[in-house]
């Protein structure tokens, strides 16, 4: 084998040759090459991102990096497809096992996932850098110190009194509390702390010094104020006035940015990012899978049919002023029609594009089918729930989660049992 | 000594080295012994290395040594023909209705070569595509008795179709061959050996590390045949395989196909279409002449019904001289290049004798009494 691929080590060349001779299915998917080059690229990218001289206190550059990496990922995807489309065990009527469809799909998913993953490298590195630079304890401690210092320094102007609520969160605890174990002090706790002890003038001077040290830490030594800090307005709240007087806005913004970076892969943010990764990867995988199992003409006709069906549905819904339940109902009907069309292929003795389109669209709709069903149930029962059991939101959210997991599980089961067989039958049928 | 081995030794003695090496490769494959096959590949490689000059003594030693080893296991050469595919009254009418293939019945056994000849646009490719399971039949049925549960995928796995316009290959040619063997279940070291064997057998080794764009159309056909053969098909369907080949390559490929069809290792039936009537007739067991979608003539059956002797002649003599020599014993037709002499009285040998006696200068002579050529 004459392999002159750049940066390809000896072990990979040997593995490549061994796969070609012994496992043409894996070899033809090129998953080994995508994994190797993908890991290599992602490590290189991570290294560059680590070395990038960006200040974590300032606005994130992830938008630029992500846009740049998306271009690279599209190029990578194209190169993968060029190599992938050269060899196809299925279309050459080679020996295939019953789990061929499932295994092929999984290899495509891994390959597409590796390419999509590169888009997340910069945000991950940024998150790691932010966590390394600012620990939870340090950040919470600093926020509490800032809030206490500013409250103590302005206790008279803020009119802090017992049993009297006033907003004392100069740096907000919103979003930070969600992720940190050690909590940021709330307004009541700050008030109690202020009322517990009255500092001397010397102590107040020390507090002021401490505040400015922290402000320099987060806002930089730059004394240039934000535009909105130049003038005081009559409608400014006491807390806002203190912020302006002590030029705290930039510091507060920067703390917010640090927090945003630190927790960009925690809690809800993480679940949304996982979803973005999963759905992008799934979409690419399904496209590649369908393309590899059907004729070129049928594949593009399927895409066209999907788009036209989408447009038609939206138009009907718009003109009919349909509710979401009607839309999901229609989508479920489509899924059932696609399933019936696919099933009918078994009885065909000629390869027709229409059957191929039904199979492709069925494969595309399966992963979201459980979601559609749950969504329809949710829409149909929401009024009853509001009436009798409150909003029932968390109760249904759980079902949505199950449906989201159930979709791919259903797809994998059908790939192993039904879809592979139906593609095998349809593709090998004689043409008219 | 087995007749096959004696035949190969005779080739070696008479310096037909190329043929001898190809037959050694075939014989070693039929032994189903990997070691012998590797030795045969080695013999072939040695021949290729020295074929332009004088072959070294080592070549003859290794060839003879190998032949002795093969001779010891010649009981493996037993070939049992089996019924491969039966097409009963298959017909095809396209939806557009512009062409219709009238019902034809064909049977192909392992080891058989069935040639389909005819002019362009008369239904050769349609018939071949029907037989390969690529086109849905309008009438009749195909039966593959060797396949236990013949679904369409299994049929297409066992029936290989090589179209006239071969689709482009991507990547290295050798990788394609390894892939073809691997998807047919030939894995590991056997895969390497079989690919090397096929490259040597079809004289493709020097081109194995090239790409599709770097080889001529003739070699593309040969590579495609190599690829298909590595997939071990039961029925090989070739549409105009000779179209891109030079005259020597045509002879060589047809002879190879003849031997490969009867291979003990992978006996197969071959169905091929061609415009090269004489070449196809030389190697085919049966030849079908298709005209306007109908089987006009089938060798082996209808040839006995020939009522006259027909010969094809190329000469510088004019029509009058020829008619004078034939003396009313034959009819003469001239197509601009050849004369066709049809005689119910004189067999071909006697026509030739008469022409020679009459001092007619003959540059080309062929007896086409039993050939499909007489219908064209």
Image: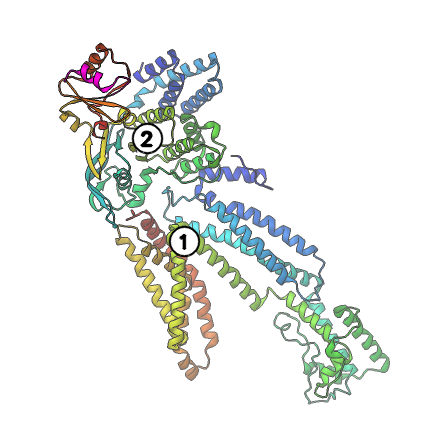
Residues shaded magenta: B312-328
In this view, the residue in front, B232 or B188, is B232
Q: Nearer the viewer, mark 2 or mark 1?
A: 1
Which subunit holds the residue at mark 1? Answer: A
The residue that disc 1 covers is A290
| Secondary structure found at label 2 | loop
Indicate yes or no whether the magenta region holds residue B320.
yes
- Give the left or right position of residue B144, taking residue B241 as reference: left
Q: Residue at x 35, y 34 (%)?
A: B232
In this view, the residue in front, A85 or B253, is B253
Quarter of the figure with residue B288? top left
The residue that disc 2 covers is B266
| Secondary structure found at label 1 | helix
Give residue B63's position: percent from left, percent from top: 42, 16
In this view, the residue in front, A261 or B128, is B128
Quarter of the figure with residue B4? top left
Indicate yes or no whether the magenta region holds residue B217.
no
Residue placed furthest toward the front:
B320
Whole-Å distance between the Cαs marked 2 and 1?
34 Å
- Give the left or right position of residue A230, taking residue B280 as reference: right
């Amino acid at each position: 084998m004459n392999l002159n691929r750049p940066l390809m080590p000896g072990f990979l060349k040997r593995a490549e040759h061994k796969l070609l001779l012994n496992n043409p299915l894996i070899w033809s998917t090129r998953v080994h090459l995508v994994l190797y080059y993908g890991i290599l690229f992602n490590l290189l990218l991570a290294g560059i991102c680590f070395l990038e001289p960006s200040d974590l206190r300032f606005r994130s550059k992830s938008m630029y990096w992500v846009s740049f990496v998306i271009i690279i990922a599209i190029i990578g995807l194209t190169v993968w497809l060029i190599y992938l489309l050269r060899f196809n065990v299925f279309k050459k009527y080679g020996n295939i096992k019953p789990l061929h469809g499932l295994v092929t799909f999984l290899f495509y998913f891994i390959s597409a996932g590796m390419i999509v993953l590169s888009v997340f490298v910069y945000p991950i590195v940024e998150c790691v850098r932010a966590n390394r630079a600012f620990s939870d304890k340090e950040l919470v401690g600093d926020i509490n110190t800032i809030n206490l210092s500013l409250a103590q320094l302005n206790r008279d102007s803020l009119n802090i009194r017992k049993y009297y609520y006033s907003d004392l969160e100069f740096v907000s605890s919103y979003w930070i509390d969600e992720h940190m174990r050690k909590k940021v002090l709330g307004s009541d706790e700050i008030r109690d702390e202020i009322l517990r002890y009255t500092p001397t003038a010397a102590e107040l001077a020390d507090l002021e010094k401490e505040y400015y040290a922290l402000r320099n830490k987060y806002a930089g030594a730059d004394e240039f104020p934000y535009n909105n800090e130049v003038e005081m307005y009559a409608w400014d709240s006491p807390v806002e006035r203190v912020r302006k007087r002590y030029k705290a806005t930039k510091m507060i913004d920067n703390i917010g940015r640090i927090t945003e970076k630190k927790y960009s892969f925690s809690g809800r943010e993480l679940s949304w990012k996982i979803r973005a990764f999963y759905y992008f990867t799934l979409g690419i995988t399904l496209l590649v899978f369908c393309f590899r199992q059907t004729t070129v003409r049928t594949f593009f006709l399927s895409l066209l049919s999907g788009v036209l069906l989408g447009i038609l549905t939206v138009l009907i819904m718009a003109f009919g002023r349909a509710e979401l339940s009607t839309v999901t109902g229609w989508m479920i009907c489509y899924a059932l029609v696609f399933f019936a069309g696919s099933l009918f292929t078994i009885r065909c003795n000629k390869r027709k594009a229409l059957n191929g389109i039904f199979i492709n669209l069925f494969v595309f709709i399966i992963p979201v089918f459980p979601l559609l069903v749950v969504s329809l149930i949710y829409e149909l029962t929401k009024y009853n729930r509001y009436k009798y059991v409150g909003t029932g939101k968390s109760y249904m959210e759980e079902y949505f989660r199950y449906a989201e997991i159930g979709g791919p599980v259903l797809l994998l089961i059908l790939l192993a049992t039904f879809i592979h067989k139906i593609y095998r039958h349809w593709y090998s049928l004689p043409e008219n | 000594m087995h007749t096959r081995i004696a035949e190969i030794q005779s080739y070696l003695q008479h310096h037909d080295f190329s043929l001898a090496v190809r037959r050694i490769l075939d014989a070693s494959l039929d032994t189903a012994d990997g070691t012998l096959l590797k030795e045969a590949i080695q013999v072939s490689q040695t021949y290729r290395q020295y074929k332009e000059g004088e072959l070294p003594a080592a070549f003859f030693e290794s060839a003879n040594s190998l032949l002795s080893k093969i001779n010891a296991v010649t009981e493996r050469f037993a070939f049992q023909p089996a019924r491969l595919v039966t097409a009963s009254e298959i017909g095809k009418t396209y939806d557009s209705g512009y062409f219709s293939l009238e019902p034809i019945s064909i049977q192909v056994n392992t080891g058989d070569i069935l040639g389909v000849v005819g002019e362009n646009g008369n239904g050769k490719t349609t018939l071949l595509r029907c037989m390969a399971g690529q086109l849905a039949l309008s009438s009749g049925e195909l039966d593959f008795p060797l396949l236990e549960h013949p679904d369409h995928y299994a049929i297409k796995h066992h029936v290989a179709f090589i179209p006239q316009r071969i689709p482009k290959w991507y990547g290295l040619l050798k990788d394609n061959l390894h892939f073809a063997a691997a998807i047919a279940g030939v894995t590991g070291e056997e895969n390497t050996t079989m690919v090397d064997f096929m490259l040597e057998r079809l004289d493709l080794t020097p081109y194995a590390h090239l790409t599709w764009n770097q080889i001529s159309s003739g070699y593309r056909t040969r590579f495609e045949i190599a690829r298909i053969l590595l997939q071990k098909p039961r029925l090989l369907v070739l549409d105009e395989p000779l179209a891109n080949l030079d005259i020597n390559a045509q002879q060589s490929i047809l002879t190879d196909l003849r031997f490969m069809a009867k291979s003990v290792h992978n006996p197969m039936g071959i169905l091929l279409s061609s415009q090269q009537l004489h070449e196809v007739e030389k190697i085919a067991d049966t030849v079908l002449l298709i005209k306007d979608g109908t089987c006009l003539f089938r060798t082996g059956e209808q040839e006995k019904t020939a009522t006259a002797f027909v010969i094809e002649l190329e000469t510088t003599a004019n029509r009058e001289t020829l008619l004078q020599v034939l003396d009313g014993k034959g009819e003469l037709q001239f197509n601009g290049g050849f004369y066709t002499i049809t005689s119910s009285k004189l067999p071909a040998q006697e026509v030739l004798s008469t022409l020679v006696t009459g001092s007619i200068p003959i540059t080309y002579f062929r007896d086409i009494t039993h050939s499909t050529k007489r219908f064209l």
